[in-house]
Image (cartoon, grey):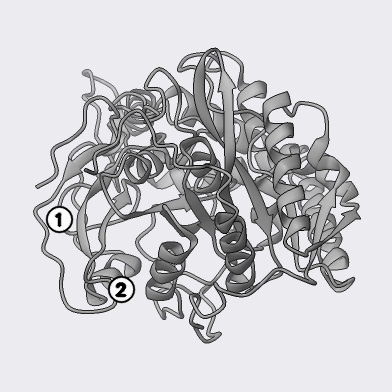
Amino acid sequence: MIARDESLSSFVEAFDATAGDGPLGDFDISVKANICTREGRTECCSKLLQGYRSPFDATVVEKLTSAGAAIVGKNNMDEFAMGSSGERSVHGPCRNPWDTSRVTGGSSGGSAAAVAAGLVRASLGSDTGGSVRQPAALCGVVGLKPTYGRVSRYGLVAYASSLDQIGPIARSCEDVAVVLGAIAGHDPNDATSSTRGVEDYTARLRESVSGKKIGVPSFARGQGVSAEVARVFDASVEAFRSRGAEIVDVELPSLEYAVPAYYLVATAEASSNLARFDGIRYGRRAELDKGEGLFELYEKSRSEGFGAEVKLRIILGTFALSAGYADKLYERALKVRRLIKDDHDRVFASGIDAILTPTAPSPAFKIGEKTDDPVAMYLEDIFTVSANLAGLPAVSLPAGLAGVDGVTLPVGVQLTGRAWDEAGILSIGAELERCELMGDAKPAVWALG
């Protein structure tokens, strides 16, 4: 049994598990705390769901165990997957294995930390606006958000249903490809899952990038990108060029509106999805005083159960959907979402194989540094939200190391691909791995011998 690592706060619950027969028979895998498992609790790291035990396994969990994987525990996360740093959990913050005074990124921070520290071979996270990729970048591992509909969401506690996807985190593109092959595919329990066939995502990992076109938008070097991230990003561009890739300047003009559009669409959907947690249908029920009724029960249960960030997003989403504002805010955000998809479609139609950007604008920052500045925190998602809005696959790859205040921290770059081309972006990512831009650096917290 894996003991909870208090120095990382990555595991919120560990299981006794035995690997089975199958292609994942040598994989020990942890899953994010918002993915349903029969064993253990599915609390979404929220006071409102403390003690909740799911009566069923999520489809991805069933598929992993059928493939022989050992599910060894649940990972810490931002409450209800709402956060960009891993700090918004009832269990306390996730801590980065490279420097435990720093954040992991969010919301799948515990999943990324567990992989980066060598506690597990792979993990599952959920990605609504970058929640697999941003923690992967800050922890120095590989994280993939599949095309919307590629992986079943059945058993994932919903945040924003038109954006959410479950994705794998591992230390290599090959392991990510293997896990993706196990969890991908149609599920009759999820009406949004695609009937498109599942390919062998490992088959193209040895492909050369020679002759492939990699698009680099001017946005990738825009305002807000730290000097260290810019340096690592430029080095990754040159690494691809040295391997024979053609680097092409591309324009995605709508990306400057991606963050505000995302935070309107996502919070509006969260407002609806989280309405069920009212202390009656689901969630912890508050104690009532004499004379109080149903309205007070709703108010008390939700006020006591939800954390500050979840409350903020519910309020934002409810306002965006309210009479007199829905057309000015929510509907306008949906139009921007369409423009973002059209921009990507146009770039890929021109022959571009993948779009390269940083994953996050800065390396891991100190715990508590941005918790009082929501705008600064939301801007951590500036490079990741567009893939969710457009429904496209994207992968974050460790691309180099940055020196920050005397500490060595990983920096990630992101490849976004055309719909259903997970194999393509993983093959390009594998070529970057072969450049060995990370050297043999390992986190300060490293569990493997």
Q: Residue at x 53, y 85 (%)?
A: 195
Q: Provide the secondary structure element on which disc 2 rests.
A: helix
Give residue 39's mark.
1
Q: Picture quarter containing residue 393? A: bottom right
State the image coordinates of residue 93 (x, y, percent, origin top left): 36, 25
State the image coordinates of residue 178 (x, y, percent, origin top left): 40, 71
Q: Residue at x 53, y 72 (%)?
A: 150
**236 displayed left or right of 434:** right
Gap between marks 1 and 2 measured at Cα: 15 Å
Crowd tier of the residue under label 1, counting other residues whose Cα lies within 10 Å: few below 14, some 14–19, many 20 or above:
some
> Looking at the image, is 293 positioned above or below residue 27?
above
Q: Nearer the viewer, residue 283 or 90?
A: 90
Q: Residue at x 67, y 56 (%)?
A: 415
Q: Nearer the viewer, residue 363 or 151?
A: 363
Q: Quadrant of the C terminus?
A: top left
**177 displayed left or right of 358:** left
Q: Residue at x 39, y 67 (%)?
A: 179
Question: Can you see residue 158?
Answer: no
Q: Which residue is mark 2?
A: 63
